[in-house]
């Protein structure tokens, strides 16, 4: 009897080193079909295509369309998605293990479909799948999101500039951002994954382990990808993509957005935004008032405690 095809799906979270895994690790894992996203359009990444030994994403544009349909098209059915996937796997599936990775599967900001629906789609399409979730401290996650998009979280692409305090209050209290807040409820996310895929098929990794307990981080990934921990360590040591934008660059972006919303031209600002040295300069560290920080802490204290209990951390 033929061995059943094994799928591994890294589903994010966004802002949790996904670009680093997708560029520095996944293309080099032996004996797998690497269908992971390869980032070439990050706000703060290098956006260069480095040596990628194994990347279907770079070689077949249909994989981009598959991912886009999977996480962002409400009008596509599971059968259509499964057909799209079957064509891709038949053409590029040389090995019996296939790796997928796309952080939009757990994103509420840049995806029009709810996380539960996206995960249910994964369950329907991939019969024998293990999922991996990388989670990050909520304050750090939100700080990183603000650094990339320091604008009204209700409309990151066109909204007006916000301070970090304004941004956080909007995020924590606005009724239209419930889904975005829920996306950082890791206990709810992991519980949903347990229900869909069973606990034995769900790996949860804290990004903080990479600095505080690297061997634990490497071991979890090595078991999932069936490689030695030393291989993971060698691929990820001192590697980081999408490092975030400088404080000066973000102030220019906010000025440009303010001018645009006011119908003004900003030629000098536009020229400065094209200077890489400004983009890659010192990063700003944003802080919150004690009241807002407490509001954030209280929003996630209980589910974080529940997750620690569930995982035995």
Image (tube, rainbow, N blue to C red):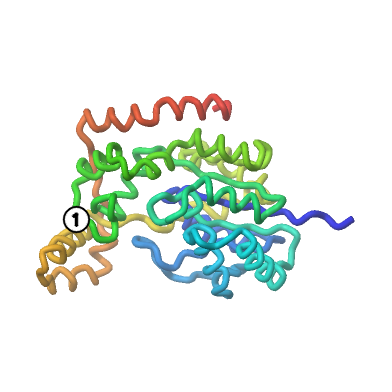
In the visual, does 165 lie left or right of 59? left
Q: Quadrant of the C terminus?
A: top right
Residue nearest the viewer, comparing 255 with 154: 154
In the visual, does 158 lie left or right of 39? left
Q: Residue furthest right?
A: 1
Q: How many marks?
A: 1
Against 312, residue 156 (above or below) is: below
The percent coordinates of residue 302 (x first, y second) are 43, 25
Other-residue count near label 1 (Cα within 10 Å), few / some / many at <14 / 14–19 / ≥20: some
Q: Residue at x 60, y 58 (%)?
A: 100
Residue nearest the viewer, comparing 134 with 198: 198
Q: Residue at x 28, y 37 (%)?
A: 173
Quarter-wise, where is residue 218 in the image? top right
Against 189, residue 308 (above or below) is: above
Q: Quadrant of the N terminus?
A: bottom right
SS class, disc 1: loop
The residue at which mark 1 appears reads as 160
Q: Residue at x 48, y 71 (%)?
A: 49
């Amino acid at each position: 009897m033929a061995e059943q095809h094994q799928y591994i799906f890294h589903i994010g979270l966004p802002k949790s080193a996904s670009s680093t895994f997708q560029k520095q690790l996944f293309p080099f894992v032996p004996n797998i079909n690497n269908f992971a996203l390869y980032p070439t359009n990050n706000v703060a990444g290098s956006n260069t295509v480095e040596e990628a030994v194994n990347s279907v994403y770079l070689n077949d544009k249909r994989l981009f369309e598959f991912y886009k349909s999977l996480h962002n098209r409400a009008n596509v059915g599971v059968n259509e998605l499964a057909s799209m996937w079957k064509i891709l796997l038949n053409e590029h599936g040389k090995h019996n293990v296939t790796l997928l990775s796309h952080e939009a599967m757990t994103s509420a900001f840049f995806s029009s479909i709810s996380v539960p629906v996206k995960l249910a789609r994964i369950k329907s399409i991939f019969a024998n799948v293990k999922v991996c979730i990388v989670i990050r401290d909520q304050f750090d996650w939100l700080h990183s999101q603000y650094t990339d998009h320091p604008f009204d979280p209700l409309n990151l692409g066109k909204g007006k500039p916000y301070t970090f305090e304004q941004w956080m209050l909007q995020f924590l209290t606005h009724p239209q951002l419930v889904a975005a807040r829920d996306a950082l409820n890791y206990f709810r996310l992991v519980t949903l994954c347990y229900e869909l895929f069973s606990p034995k098929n769900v790996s949860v990794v804290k990004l903080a382990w990479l600095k505080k307990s690297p061997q634990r981080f490497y071991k979890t990934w090595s078991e999932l990808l069936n490689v030695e921990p030393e291989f993971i360590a060698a691929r990820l040591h001192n590697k980081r993509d999408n490092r975030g934008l400088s404080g000066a660059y973000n102030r220019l972006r906010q000025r440009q957005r303010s001018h645009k919303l006011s119908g003004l031209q900003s030629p000098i600002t536009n020229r400065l935004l094209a200077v890489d040295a400004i983009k890659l300069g010192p990063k700003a560290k944003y802080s919150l008032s004690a009241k807002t920080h407490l509001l954030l802490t209280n929003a996630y204290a209980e589910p974080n405690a529940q997750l620690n209990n569930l995982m035995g951390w």
